[in-house]
């Protein structure tokens, strides 16, 4: 199917309209006549540059925009300043593999997993699990998912937490016998002479018992047909809205 032709906005000659053309397209000769036009042949050739890979190695680019010296670094970017320990240093060397092969050879189908208690079979993915408190000891064979889950939980506990979670994590995870510090309760004196916690003074300097007594008076006066403004003036309340809200007040501390 031939393309639709429209007149050029500068010379008026017909030109084909593509998908990315403007409502008033410009033909190629008119575009080439502009002072700032640059064709692909007139552009300067690309020059390779020396760049530094995130792993720290300096290399020469083989194509524009290249950032990594090796293809595997693009899939798994290296972290500068962080070197992973060897397999033997992490406790998975030859001795560990030897013990794992011996445990797999003597595994009885249906043996319970030390982590979850479910049955284990030789055709499942099994790990030779270290003890949580000491890596010199082993729990024996366990499911791979159970071992990885336990390691993730332990790593999250040891990892640094935000400042607003440090105290809570320290109290709940790292010290089972720790007791959360109790914040002292600030007391306030009511107009009747009694003291009550300051956080319960949501309606002024009165205790809950006094507000409950005033609420009973508000409901009794409202039952006689008095207006909210009249009730507020009689009981010394600030406005009619306060009298209306007090009609729903209950002292839930008194059973």
Image (tube, rainbow, N blue to C red):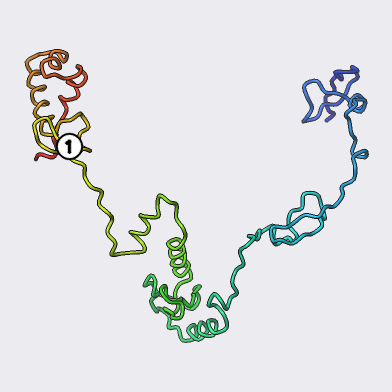
Crowding at label 1, few (<14), some or many (≥20) Cα neighbours within 10 Å? some
Q: Quadrant of residue 228?
A: top left
| Position of 52 relative to 219 (above/below) | below
Q: Where residue 32 sits: x, y (%)?
A: 92, 28
Residue placed under numbered mark 1 in the picture: 188
> Which quadrant does the C terminus fall into?
top left
212 left or right of 99 in image: left
53 left or right of 118 in image: right
Q: Residue at x 45, y 72 (%)?
A: 143
| Position of 215 relative to 41 (above/below) | above
Q: In which quarter of the image is residue 11?
A: top right
Q: Is mark 1 on a helix, strand or loop?
A: strand
Q: Which residue is drawn at 93% across and 25% down?
A: 33
> Which quadrant does the N terminus fall into?
top right
115 left or right of 68 in image: left
Q: Where residue 176 sits: x, y (%)?
A: 30, 64
Q: Which residue is drawn at 44% across and 63% down?
A: 158
Q: Where residue 254 sits: x, y (%)?
A: 10, 39
Q: Which residue is drawn at 8% across and 26% down?
A: 216
Front-most of residues 134 and 139:
134
């Amino acid at each position: 199917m031939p393309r639709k032709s429209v007149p050029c906005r500068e010379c008026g000659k017909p030109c084909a309209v593509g998908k990315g053309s403007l409502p008033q397209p410009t033909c190629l000769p008119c575009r080439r006549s502009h002072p700032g036009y640059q064709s692909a042949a007139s552009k300067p050739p690309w020059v390779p540059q020396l760049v530094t890979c995130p792993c720290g190695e300096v290399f020469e680019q083989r194509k524009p925009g290249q950032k990594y010296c090796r293809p595997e670094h693009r899939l798994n970017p290296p972290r500068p300043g962080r070197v992973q320990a060897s397999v033997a240093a992490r406790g998975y060397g030859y001795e560990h593999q030897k013990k794992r092969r011996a445990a797999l050879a003597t595994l009885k189908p249906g043996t319970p997993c030390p982590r979850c208690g479910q049955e284990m079979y030789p055709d499942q993915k099994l790990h030779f699990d270290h003890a949580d408190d000491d890596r010199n000891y082993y729990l024996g064979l366990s499911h791979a998912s159970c071992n990885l889950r336990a390691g993730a939980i332990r790593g999250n506990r040891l990892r640094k937490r935000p400042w607003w979670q440090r105290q809570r994590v320290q109290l709940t995870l790292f010290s089972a016998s720790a007791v959360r510090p109790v914040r002292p309760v600030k007391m306030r004196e009511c107009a009747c002479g009694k003291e009550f916690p300051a956080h319960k003074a949501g309606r002024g300097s009165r205790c809950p018992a006094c507000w409950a007594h005033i609420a009973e008076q508000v409901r009794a006066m409202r039952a006689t047909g008095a207006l909210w403004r009249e009730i507020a003036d009689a009981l010394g309340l600030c406005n009619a809205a306060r009298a209306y809200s007090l009609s729903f007040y209950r002292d839930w501390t008194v059973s």
